[in-house]
Each structure stands twice: as structure tokens, then as C-alpha cells.
Amino acid sequence: MQKRISFLIIMLFIITIIFSSCGRKYKYIYQKKFNTDTTYIYTNNFEKFVLKTNDILHINVVTTNVELSKQFKLEKSESSLNNNSNGNNFYLTGYNIDENGDIDMPIVGKINIGGKTFSEAKIIIRNKINLLISDAIVNVKLVSFRITILGEVNTPGPIRIYQERVHVLEAIARCGGASNYGDLRKIRIVRETKTGHKIYSLNLTKPELLNEDKFYLHPNDILIIDPVPTKTLQLNIKDYMYFISAFSTSLSTIFLILQLKSN
């Protein structure tokens, strides 16, 4: 009986160590093996982002009339905009979309772009300005494109995107990639919509991810990478070890009492 109890204790200890040492075993879709010289086509159903209240646009208007050009420039200098690192300057110098979906520009006045895609908004803004200034060169940028990444990434936190769109793989890469404990099968996206916040689920290990309309992120999305179940086990390994020690001590005590009684 003593040998049997000792064997059970050893097996329990080995199983605990095995589970506690397990890390992430899941691979990104680009790490999977594909057939050589084979073309794989995945049609992306991109969910178009539409502009809404509090989105900020940077609009730069250049004309042959220097004084007229200056009236459109809200920033103190072009270099201050280029050197902006945290987005504060964008908030101060950009054109904010109000609750009615309008931006208010010098000379031009109010332009309604709420509910429009960014591409549609650029065309509307350029047309409005060109009606008043025929030789104007208009450059429009969305500067409120920020994503927050939480959970099992190497450098969690907000990141600012200086392009019109970004997909989930690039966003995670900008945070140093998923940690060794990131569960790539369980990625959550929290997205603000007109009716409230929606939560989407993505699996980064399946090629079908490329067909998902959530593959491309929207401004202000929150990306959450959950930990693999074994992380909890490893974090609590000391508690498990104390439990195993107490369990083995209890068994030894019980066995000793039984031995004494039998004698």
C-alpha cells in the first residue's frame, strides 16, 4: 500500500510539472505549412469604417495665394505636426467632427461628413474647397486612428496608426507580437458602434481569418488577447506545490497511523 501511495504522489507531481511548463503551441496562419508553388486566394469582406462624432481630420490646403493658404492652417508649424508623437497636437490642430457630423473650416464653412466613409469624405471636402478656390491642392488625413491592445502581447497599450487602415496581424506585430502565453485562437475585438459596443471573436490560427470582415481594424478598436489556460496553472504553481506537499504529508500521516494500529 505504501508503494502505491508513493507512486500516486509521484505521478501527481509529474503531471503538475508537465502542465505548468506548457506554453503556447498555436501558430499564426503565416507559420502554417502550405503547398509549394500553390496560390491561395482569400477574398476579404472588409467592413467599411464610417466617420462619426469626435473623429479628427487633418486637412492641408495649399494654393498659389499664400495668405489664403495660411487661413486653412490651424497648426503653428508643419514641423510640429510631423514631430507629434502622442496625438495631442492632432487634437488641438485637427478638424473635429461635431455631434451633427459637421466640420467647420475657414472660408468654406460647415461640411457634413458624418456617416461617410473616409474616401467619400475626402471627395466631399475637396469638392467643397475647389468650388471656392480653383487651384487648391487638398490633402486629407484621418489622425484619430488609435487602437488599444491588451492582454498577452509583449508591449500592451495604445498604438497610433498613420495610414488609412490596418489589419489585426500588423496591429499585434506593432506591440511586439503575442507573448508565449497568448491564445491565438481567442482574440477579441471590442468595437464602438452607433447602437453600442460589439465584441467580435477571431482565430489567428485559421486561414479563414483572411475572409473575416473584422480582419481589418477600425479606429478606437480594443484588441484583447486571452492567455492560454496553462498560464494560470504556472502562475499558481507555488500554491499547487504547497497543496501537493500537504497532500503527501497527510497521506504519510494516515499511512503511519494505520501502520501503528495494525501493530
Image (cartoon, rainbow, N blue to C red):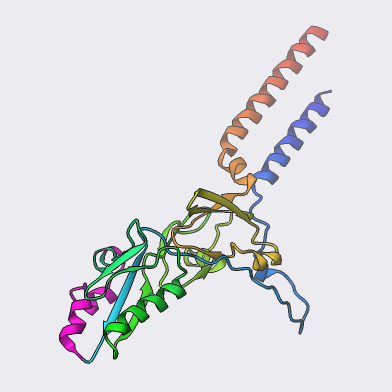
Tell me residue 30's x, y (percent). Answer: 66, 71
Residue 34 vs residue 238: left or right?
A: right
State the residue in front, 240 or 133: 133
For the C terminus, the image quarter is top right
Whether residue 80 appears in magenta in the rendering, the answer is yes
The answer to whether residue 183 is seen in the rendering is no
For the N terminus, the image quarter is top right
- Residue appearing at x 29%, y 76% in the figure: 82
Tell me residue 76's x, y (percent). Answer: 18, 74
**218 in relation to 231, above or below:** below
Residue extending furthest toward the front? 131
Residue extending furthest toward the left? 67
- Residue appearing at x 59%, y 42% in the figure: 232
Tell me residue 60's x, y (percent). Answer: 29, 79
Q: Which residues are magenta?
A: 65-88
**36 in relation to 167, above or below:** below
Kindly indicate the quadrant of the structure image that contains residue 212: bottom right
Kindly indicate the quadrant of the structure image that contains residue 86: bottom left
Residue 146 vs residue 105: left or right?
A: right
**95 in relation to 78, above or below:** above
**199 in relation to 220, above or below:** above
State the residue in front, 64 or 110: 110
State the residue in front, 127 or 148: 127
State the residue in front, 249 or 134: 134
Residue 8 vs residue 239: left or right?
A: right
